[in-house]
Amino acid sequence: MNRLIDKLALKNDDWINIVKSFGADEHTAKDVVQNMYIKLHEWEERGNNSILYNKDEVNYYFVFKVLRSVWIDLLRKNKKYIPTDNKKIFVKSNEQEQSEVDFTIGLKEKLENMHWYDKRVFDIVCIQGISMLQLSELTGISYYSIKRTIKKVKKHLK
């Protein structure tokens, strides 16, 4: 059994509470802690010695920084994440809903007049939320080509 993971697992509840203090719910906190275990295990395999003091004691500050970085990475990947403590419910009026419907219909009409490639790239990046870099890596299309396409579509929609 891995000595580092055994030592870290003794403080599992503490790690979860630390992530909860960042604003995560219970389930998300457990996911972040699991990702921290994976990251620290990989670092140990590469020979990183800053995880333990004197090969016996866990470097709590280092673990805290790893938890914080994993949490921030999660927030960056999912920009729509709202911590459970801060959720608010907004009620829309019928006028707001109607104006949103009119805007959406106008947007769809403008998109229909565009080339299929431009529509598809815009849909993937702006509506589905895949980053331009991810799309570039998945398809082999130049990042700057995708960026120019998005810029062109946004200009057309204005």
Image (cartoon, rainbow, N blue to C red):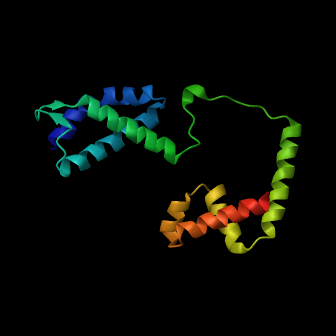
105 over 20 or under it: above or below: below
Quarter of the rendering occupied by the N terminus: top left
Q: Residue at x 61, y 59 (%)?
A: 125
Spot occupied by residue 12 in the image (x, y as percentages of width and height): 30, 31
Q: Residue at x 19, y 51 (%)?
A: 45
Q: Residue at x 25, y 50 (%)?
A: 42
Q: How many marks?
A: 0
Seen in the image, is 121 located left or right of residue 31?
right
Seen in the image, is 55 located left or right of residue 126?
left
142 over 126 or under it: above or below: below
Q: Is residue 9 visible?
A: yes
Spot occupied by residue 138 in the image (x, y as percentages of width and height): 49, 68
Quarter of the rendering occupied by the C terminus: bottom right
Q: Nearer the viewer, residue 63 or 157?
A: 157
Spot occupied by residue 50 in the image (x, y as percentages of width and height): 20, 39
Seen in the image, is 38 located left or right of residue 90?
left
119 over 14 or under it: above or below: below
Image-quadrant location for residue 131: bottom right
Spot occupied by residue 154 in the image (x, y as percentages of width and height): 72, 59
Q: Nearer the viewer, residue 68 or 19?
A: 68
Q: Is residue 31 visible?
A: no
Q: Residue at x 43, y 25 (%)?
A: 21
Image-quadrant location for residue 66: top left
